[in-house]
Image (cartoon, rainbow, N blue to C red):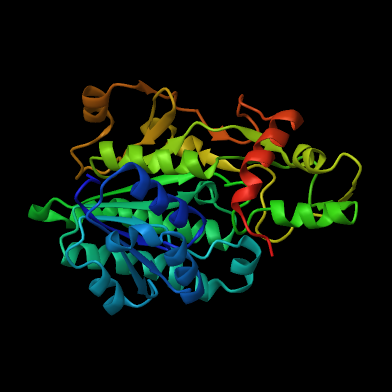
Amino acid sequence: MINNKVILVTGGTGSFGSVFVEYLLKNYNPKKILIFSRDEQKQFLMEKKLFKYKKKLRFLIGDVRDLNRVEFATKNVDLVIHAAAMKHVLIAEYNPFEVVKTNIIGAQNVIDACLKNNVKKIVALSTDKASSPVNIYGASKLTSDKLFIAANNYAGKNKNIFSVVRYGNVLGSKGSILPLFLKGAKKNLITITDRRMTRFNITLNESVNLVIRAINTMVGGEIYVPKIPSFKVTDLAKAISSVSKIKIIGIKPGEKIHEELISIHESKNTIEFKNHFVIVSNSEFFFWNKSNYLKKFGGKSCRDNFSYNSDNNKNKLTISSLKKILNQEIKKFDYK
C-alpha cells in the first residue's frame, strides 16, 4: 500500500511527518508524496534536505481548516496520513476555539475530502491524552478519533477505510518537556510540576513503524496502541543533569499525574498482540468486531478491567536507559 502509491501527509513538516516522509523515501518506492502544512520555511528547509528525491515530492501550503484546500490536496491520492494538529496542552487550554478549528473541524475536513475523492486508506495520528481526557487538547483528539472511526460508516461502496494510531510522548518533539529541562539544566535548576508524574515514551522511529504496521494491516475502525516504556519525570531530569536542583512548581492547567493509552472502558474491545494492542470498534454496523478481528488476526482478549497507563506499565525506563535514549534522540531536534 506504499510502493507506487500517491501519499498525502498533513502536518508533513512536523516532528513525525518529516521523519515519516524521509523513511518512506529511503525504504519504499512511492509514486509521489505530498507534504501538506502551513509553514513555508519548514517546507523550504525540508525540500533542501530531501533534494535528491525532488521528483517524488510535492509541497503544498495549506491548512486543514480550509476544506477547499484539503479537497484539492486529496485528489488522486491513495493514502492519507493525518498528522496535522495543535498539540501544546497549556496553549490549548487558553485557546480552545482555535484547537477545535484545527483538531476537530480540521479532522472532519480531512474525512470529507477523502470520502469525496475516494482515498482508499486514511490513518489519523492520536495521543495518550485522548484516553480519559482532562484537557482541551485531549478532548479534541478524542473527538477526532471518534470522527475517523465513525467515518467507516460513510464509506459505502467505495470501501474507504479509516483507522487511528494512538501513542505517547515522543521525547524531544515539539511540545515535549525535554527542551524545557535542557534549558533549566544550563542554569542548574529544573522545574517539575509534580514528583509523582510519569509519562510514556516512544521514539520517532517506533512511531513510524507503528504507522507502517497500521497501513499494512488496517481493516477500518481500529485504534492501534504500541507497547512502549514509561518513565518518572524526576528520573528524566536526573538523566539530563545529576547536579541540577529540582524545583516543584505545581501542576499546570490540563496536566495529568499519569498518562493513559487504554482506559478501563476500552478494555472490553481491546486485543493484545506481541508488540501492540488494537482497540476495535463496538459499533453494531462494523463487520470487524472483536470476534471477527480475533478470527482473522489472532491475538488475545484483554480482561474487562484492564487499563494501560504510564504508572501501572511494567516496562519502566531507568535513569541510565534514559541517558542512552537522550544521546540517540537529542541530535534529531533543533531547540533554538
Left-right relation of 265 to 335: left
Q: Residue at x 48, y 41 (%)?
A: 205
Outermost residue, front side: 52
- Residue 297 higher or lower than 93, as above or below: above
The quarter of the picture where the C terminus appears is bottom right
* Image position, residue 294 (x, y; %): 27, 25
Q: Residue at x 50, y 51 (%)?
A: 130
Left-right relation of 144 to 3: right
Number of residue marks: 0
The quarter of the picture where the N terminus appears is top left
* Image position, residue 169 (x, y; %): 58, 46
Left-right relation of 40 to 35: right
- Residue 132 higher or lower than 90, as above or below: above
Q: Residue at x 25, y 51 (%)?
A: 30
Q: Is residue 222 visible?
A: no
As rendered, which of 291 and 313 lies closer to the eye?
A: 313
Left-right relation of 176 to 285: right
* Image position, residue 258 (x, y; %): 65, 42
* Image position, residue 195 (x, y; %): 81, 42
Q: Is residue 144 visible?
A: yes
Q: Residue at x 77, y 40 (%)?
A: 196
